[in-house]
Amino acid sequence: MSTKIKDATIPTIPFKARLSRWFGRNLLRIYMIFGFTYLFIPVAYTFAFSFNDSGKSNLIWKGFTLNNWKNPCGAPEVCNALGNSIKIGLLATTFATILGTMIAFAIGRYQFKGRSSSNLLIFLPMATPEIVLGASLLSLFLVFKINPGFWPTVIAHVMFCISFVVVTVKARIASLDPRLEQAAMDLYANELETFRRVTLPLVAPGIAGAALLAFSLSFDDFIITNFNSGTLITFPKFVYVAAARGIPAQANVIGSSMFFLALAIVIAGQLVNRKKAR
Amino acid sequence: MSITLPKVRVPYLLLFPGFAFLFTFFILPIVNLAQTSTQTPIPGGDTGQYEQSFAFSNYINAFLDNRDQFARSFVYATLATIFALAIAYPLAYAIAFKSGKFKNILLVLVVAPFFTSFLLRTIAWKQILGEEGFLVPTLRSLHLMGQQTTITSTAVAVVAGMTYNFLPFMTLPLYASLERIDPRTIEASGDLYANGITTFRRVTVPLSLPGVVAGTLLTFIPAAGDYVNASILGSPNTKMIGNVIESRYFKIVDYPTAAALSFTLMAAILILVTLYIRKAGTEELV
């Protein structure tokens, strides 16, 4: 019976109406294809040009080679800059994650006088343009006759990462089920044990996410770094300076590697979460 | 418990190290910047030597000399924010509601491009849109673009670059607020005979408003202070206030003007943000 009805109805819908209905149903899907293409164009370009046999200036396609991937330090200044960025990133992430997590617990877990002004102090650095953060910090260092360089850059990165850590960890704390901690207390765990064995493991994914965010913010920062690093070259700074005469293809190798590495970490994190959920 | 602390003190002890750090390296520099902004050069001193003379005229001069760059910063940042919202909203909506079991993968993919260095991406755009890229010659040969017109070194390129680079700051808060919407409220709207468009307009959009506010702020603020896009993708005619502050610091060593400009930028952004939050009416921001 149903087939008969179908047979009878389909031809009565004019082609135009069917087309517009198909579009209506698939509009978002088509949009997503365009959206993701747009998002990935520069990444694909960077990846493709990491195979360019270009010598010093990676502007025009000159032929395929694997040499850049085999020898990512072929342009030595790239690796030097990368090393600085990783060192700064790890140090800044460690300090910002510790300080930020403590603040997040204070704000997320306690009612106290000055809580809303604490929230404001956390929000302000995020609402201040990077150039103002960078320029004001440099002015301070100059007043105290501290030369810009490695440690001033680390300090600057800790400063702008703290707020992002607080926000990320706070969100995780807010989403915890308070009954889990109550259950631990009911089972005679004291406050410290409850924190160590229940609260902390539950908040840990939030802290890990915050650390990952802090590292990627630090690693990718250019504006604040440019103000406070003096003659020290970080990876973004190297790319910016080299941009005028064309960047070596090794920089593309490192950019692409960062992309795949971050993707792998995030996917691994998701898999771990899923396993735990089961 | 092995350590006994008066309970009231715990939050303050937790806050202390972080806030001491922020006070020293965020608040103090801003106060110092305010002091610098009213200094004038020491008569007969070297370049870079200034003394405090409470010259508030620094602000007026700095603003009047750079009106165009200020205007550009706010116009470009506003345009980039609007475009980013237009691109990100449907994307976040599709991921939150229409992607089923691919939700997490798609969410990762939306953020993934931004793990490639910000500068490498911007330079990639410069080369894709540039004279030697494939787009411009193709458009020219199809006569869709004049032989003399270019894309790079124009305001279009700068705004496009900013839109792209700040997109995740828009997408993530939007997704977070859309994902939190209880699907039953949307079903209820349908049960009450609202069609798809009405439901979207009267239920989905209002419920996603906190995400829109957070996303537009997180896009607008860095965009207004940005100078990287303008210097890589633009020309001297697209200079923004960030470019001016940067060159005042490093090339001209005119700290008071740079400080006055920084302060004006920050004040302008804070005022706009406050007005905007009042108007949008959301308390919960971060």
Image: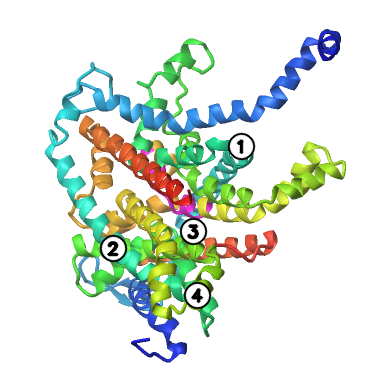
Contact check, label 1 and label 3, Cβ < 8 Å:
no
Provide the secondary structure element on which disc 4 rests.
helix
The answer, for residue B258, to whether it is visible in the render is: no
Name the residue type under label 2. Answer: Thr
| Chain for numbered disc 3 | B
Q: Label 1: chain?
A: B
Tags 2 and 3 both on a single chain: no
Image label count: 4
Of badges 4 and 2, the one in the foreground is 4
- How much space separates mark 1 and mark 3, taking CA atoms? 46 Å
Q: Indicate the chain on which mark 4 is placed.
A: A
Horizontally, is A9 left or right of B214 in the view? right
* Magenta-span inclusion, residue B229: yes
Whether residue B258 appears in magenta in the rendering, the answer is no
Q: CB under 8 Å between callouts 4 and 2?
A: no
Name the residue: 36% across, 39% down. B232
Disc 2 target residue: A94
Q: Are marks 2 and 3 in contact (CB under 8 Å)?
A: no
Instruction: Judge left or right: residue B85 versus residue A4.
Output: left
- Marks 1 and 2 belong to one chain: no
Span colored in magenta? B220-232
Number of residues whose C-alpha sits closer than 10 Å to that of mark 4, classed few (under 14), some (14–19) or many (20 or more): few
Q: Chain of mark 2?
A: A
The answer to whether A178 appears left or right of A64 in the picture is right
Question: Which residue position is annotated with label 4?
Answer: A109
- Residue picked out by circle 1: B94
**Sequence-wise, which precedes: disc 4 or disc 2?**
2
Q: Residues within 10 Å of mark 2 (few under 14, many from 20)?
A: some
Earlier sequence position, callout 1 versus callout 3: 3
- Quadrant in which residue A193 is drawn: bottom left
